[in-house]
Image (cartoon, grey):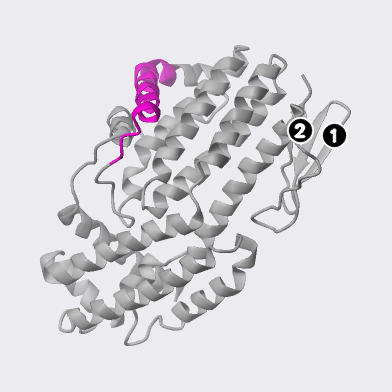
Amino acid sequence: MEVKMFLRCFVLRCFIGLFFSILAVNGYSGTLDAVRQQFEIYQRFPGEIEILSTDDLSEIDNVLARTEAKRLTVREELDKALRERQPNKDLPSPLFAEVSLPPFMYYVAVERAHARRSLAQDKPDEVAESIRYVYHLAEELSLSGSLEWRAAAARIRLQMLETAQSLLLHPRCRKEHHEALHKIFENQINRRTTDAVIWTRYREEGKQFFAGIGQHGLDKMVSPELLKELMDRDAFSGYEKAMARRTAHDRSVFHRVSEAVIESCSVPFFQRQPVLRQLEHELRTQRGTAAEPVFALLLLRDVSRYMQLFAQERSGIELAYLALSASLGKHNHNNTMQNFLTGREYEIRLITDGVMCTYEGNIKPFYVPYR
């Protein structure tokens, strides 16, 4: 059964990819396009991200030397984006976005490797700059309606917390680096996109997707071979004959459930669990039925997982910010902050040589030594 579901999902994603390769605008303008142009070479050198993640500085140096000009060009584009705030236009669809992510992840891998090498060379200023620019990229990715891109931004932010922790533990780290990191995390909090906005954008992307299905039909969008394979599946039986009705049903399910998801965002993540479980149960019971809303189910897959990731990202950023605030004497201990993920307060401990901040369920506290 699990294999069958996997194959079904795989075929569906192939179908969706083909749909958007036909209908979507090729390319997109703005800062993200500039990053893509610089680092799309990743497609031809897929093993280099593994090299960049190693501790072998000699191997890392070879890749960094070859990508240095590209890395600096991307930094210039990110600076330009902050000054001019030009929108990223014609972004990929939410169901076709993951194929466009590799160039951005390659840039992040280069900056992280550059930061590791800079630490080894006792250059903490360079590490702080790498963190700042990667967070700028995460902000650009977060503006998309794509859940894949927004999730990538969350993972990038969490990864860079490890880089920030390494910087703070370095013997040449000074108070000015604490101040720089504090400002970076403060900006991340102030510029945060709310979950309601994230899911509202995604709902609009879904509406466009359904409009495309209704306008073109399956036979105009896929090869005869793939169409036959789709039609042989129970969920697709008779789909083409009743395209308007089935698409309308899928659209109705997607709209109703996505509305409920957006409404759930009025409370913190830890209070949404009952609503999310109910929605997931409702969708699960429709799988394999004659009226299975195939595309609605695909669009709404892993809602809880995405929400949890975004909550973890928020908790990680707040954790670092609170620890740095306390170390710099900027935290008011009379004002407590509730953790969005767990509902419990963050714990800030002032110890002999620094500040330790954690929250329930997190096995990695954030530590800031006094300088």
Task: Mark yes or no: residue 136 visible.
Answer: yes
Residue furthest toward the bottom? 290
Magenta-drawn segment: 62-88
Label 1 SS: strand
Q: Earlier in the sequence, mark 1 or mark 2?
A: 2
Q: In what quadrant of the picture does the N terminus appear?
A: bottom left
Q: Is residue 98 above or below residue 253?
A: above
Q: Tag on residue 109?
A: none
Q: Residue 46: give x, y in percent of width and height.
A: 37, 35
The residue at the point 50 percent across, 56 percent down is 195
In the image, 310 versus 264, the foreground residue is: 264
Q: Residue 337: give x, y in percent of width and height.
A: 72, 48
Residue furthest toward the right? 352
Q: Residue 305: give x, y in percent of width and height.
A: 53, 60
Residue under label 2, please give it: 326
* Magenta span dominant secondary structure: helix
